[in-house]
Amino acid sequence: MSARTLMVVAAARQIRDGEVVFAGMRLPLLGFAVAKATHAPNAVGLFENGLIREMPASGMVVTMGDTPNQRNATAATTLIDVMGMLQHGRVDVGFLGGAEVDARGNLNTTKVGNTRLPGSGGGSDIAAHAKRCVFIMEHERRRFVERTSYITSRPRDSVTLITTLGVFALGAGAAPRAISLHPGVTSKQVREETGFGLDFSAAEVTPEPNDLELAAIRAADPTGFWTSGSQ
Amino acid sequence: MTKLTTTRDAVAQFVRDGDRVSAACGLEARIPFSAGHEIIRQGKRDLTLLGPISDTLYDQLIGAGCVRAVEAAWIGNVGAGLGHNFRRAAEATPPQIAITDYSNLTYATGVRAAAEGVPFGVTRSVAGSSMAAQTTAFRELDDPFTGERVMAVRAIPVDVAIVVAQRADENGNAHIWGNLGTTIDSVRAAERVILIAEELVSRDVIRSEPNRTLVPGFLVNAVVIEPGAAHPSPVDGYEERDHAAFDAYHRATRTADGWVAWRREWIDDVPDRRAYLRKLGR
C-alpha cells in the first residue's frame, strides 16, 4: 500500500455526498474521482479556470485545462463566475497543497527565504472561502514549521492535513493534533518530521482502503502514475 | 472590414515596448505561445505581464529579458512546478523583475473593474494574507452601507490582450468554448486586442450561435488565423496539451545556459509558427 494511495482515499473520505468541492489537481482530483465512484456520487467539482464537473475526467489530467477535464464537463464558464460562487459560500470543501504549513494552518506557496515559488493561484481564495479546507502535502520537517514566513493562504476555519505519514487537524484555535497515523508510522517518526508540537493522545491508525476504493483508484489512475511507488 | 494579418505584423503593430500585456486569459488553456515567441524574436522590452496564469509562456518572456514586471496569481510550469527563468529573475540581487502577487479571484476582480471602467473591485479574499500588504493593489476599506471591512482591488488596466479562440470571422468576432478563465474581461479591459483563431469562419457561422461570441469584433485590432498557435497548451476541440513538451522545457531550462540553448532552438531559429509545427513533425 503506497502512502499516496492512503492519501487519495483519505482525501476521498473528506467529501460527503452532495457536497460542492474544489478538488484542484493531482491527488485531490483522484480523491474526488474515488469519492464519486464510492460514497459520494452526487458531489460536484468546481475548477477555478471555469469548469464545473459532475463526473470525473476520463483520461490523464495534468492541468485542469487539459481536454479530458473539459470533455463531459457540466458547464464551462469563467474564473470570476466559479470563484464568485466560492466567495459566496457555496463550496463545502477545498483541497490545497503548499511548500510550507504552520501550526495555525497558514499555507505558504509564495516564497521561502530567497526561494521564489509560483504563488497563490486560487489557493488563497479557496482557503478564505471554503467551509472546510483539506491540505495534502509531503510530510517533511522543512515544510511543517511553527510559523510560515509568508502567508499566502489563511484558512477561514479548521484544516484537515493529509500527509505521507498521517492525517492531522490544525487551526481554529485548537492545538494541532494527530487524527490518525498511516499503518506502520510511529509518533516518534512524525515528531521528527514536524516543526511544531502535536497532540497524539487520540491518534488512531488510518484505515486501509476497501476493495471498492482500490478499484476506483485503479480506474482513475490506471497506469499508477500518481499512486504507485513507495511514497 | 478585414483585420486579417500575420502574427509577425500583429505583434509589430500592436505590442509596444512598456505595454501591459495580457496573454494568460485561459489559465492553462489557449495560451498564445506563437505570439509570445514573436514578441521575443522582435525583442520587445519593459513589458508588464498580467495574470492570472500562463503556464510556461511568462517564464519564457521573462527569460528573454522582455519583462519589467509581473502582476499575476501563479508563475511557473503547471505540470512540472517551478519556472526556472522566473525564479532566476526573482531571486537575483537586485531582482530583475517587480512582482505583484494576486490570488486568482483578486486578479479577476481587478481586471473586471478595468473592463467595466471603474477604479476598483471589491472582494473578501486575501484579508490576513501577506499579499494584502501590497498596498498598490489592495486596500481594506469600510463597506459604506454596513461598515464591514472589505478588500478593494485596484483596477488592472490592460494595454494589449492576446487571445486564442477556436474560430473567428475576419472582423474578429470570435467563438470560444471550454473553460474561459478571464478571457471575457481581459478583452474588455484592453486598449488593443490581437485575436488568434484556429479557424476562419463566415459571419453567418458567428451569428448562428451568438451566445458563443465571447469576443465582439469591434474590440479587436488584428485577426490571425494560425492553427497550432497555442501549442503546447490545449485548445478544446483542436489541440491536446503536450505534456512531454512542458516536461522537456522544464528539464532543458534548469540552467541559464540551458534556457539560452532552448530559446535558440525553439524561438530564434524558428521564423514562425508554421516552421515550429514542421519542427514538431506536423
Image (cartoon, coloured by chain):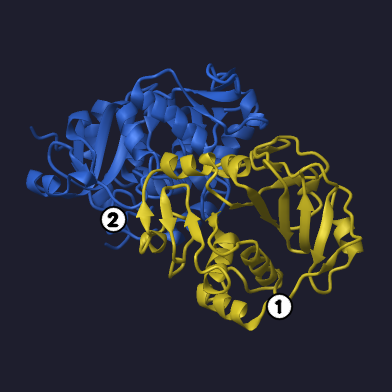
Chain colours: A yellow, B blue
Q: Nearer the viewer, residue B140 or A137?
A: B140
Residue holding disc 2: B277
Task: Report the side of A66 relative to B145 (left or right).
Answer: left
Q: Nearer the viewer, residue B235 or A14?
A: A14
Asked if labels 2 and 1 share a chain, the reply is no
Q: Secondary structure at mark 2?
A: helix
Residue located 69% across and 47% down the image: A99
Residue B116 lies in what quarter of the image?
A: top left
Residue located 70% across and 74% down the image: A2
Q: Compared to A134, does A105 lie above or below?
A: above
Q: Nearer the viewer, residue B34 or A225?
A: A225
Residue B158 in view: no
Residue A84's mark? Answer: none
Residue A1's mark? Answer: 1
Q: Secondary structure at mark 1?
A: loop
Residue located 42% across and 60% down the image: A69
Task: Pinpoint residue A66: horizontal percent, then vertical percent.
Answer: 41, 58
Task: Report the side of A206 relative to A228 (left or right).
Answer: right
Q: Compared to B158, does B248 lie above or below?
A: below
Q: Quadrant of the C terminus of chain B?
A: bottom left
Task: Pinpoint residue B74: horizontal percent, then vertical percent.
Answer: 53, 41
Three-letter amino acid code of the residue under disc 2: Leu
Around disc 1, counting alpha carbons within 10 Å, would you say few (fewer than 14), some (14 to 19), or many (20 or more)? few
Three-letter amino acid code of the residue under disc 1: Met
Task: Pinpoint residue A147: horizontal percent, then vertical percent.
Answer: 80, 39
Task: Pinpoint residue B125: horizontal percent, then vertical percent.
Answer: 57, 34
Task: Report the side of B20 relative to A179 (left or right).
Answer: left
What chain letter is assigned to the residue under label 2?
Answer: B
Residue B176 in view: yes
Task: State the CA–CA distance, disc 2 to disc 1.
Answer: 43 Å
Which residue sits furthest bottom? A211
Residue B96 lies in what quarter of the image?
A: top right
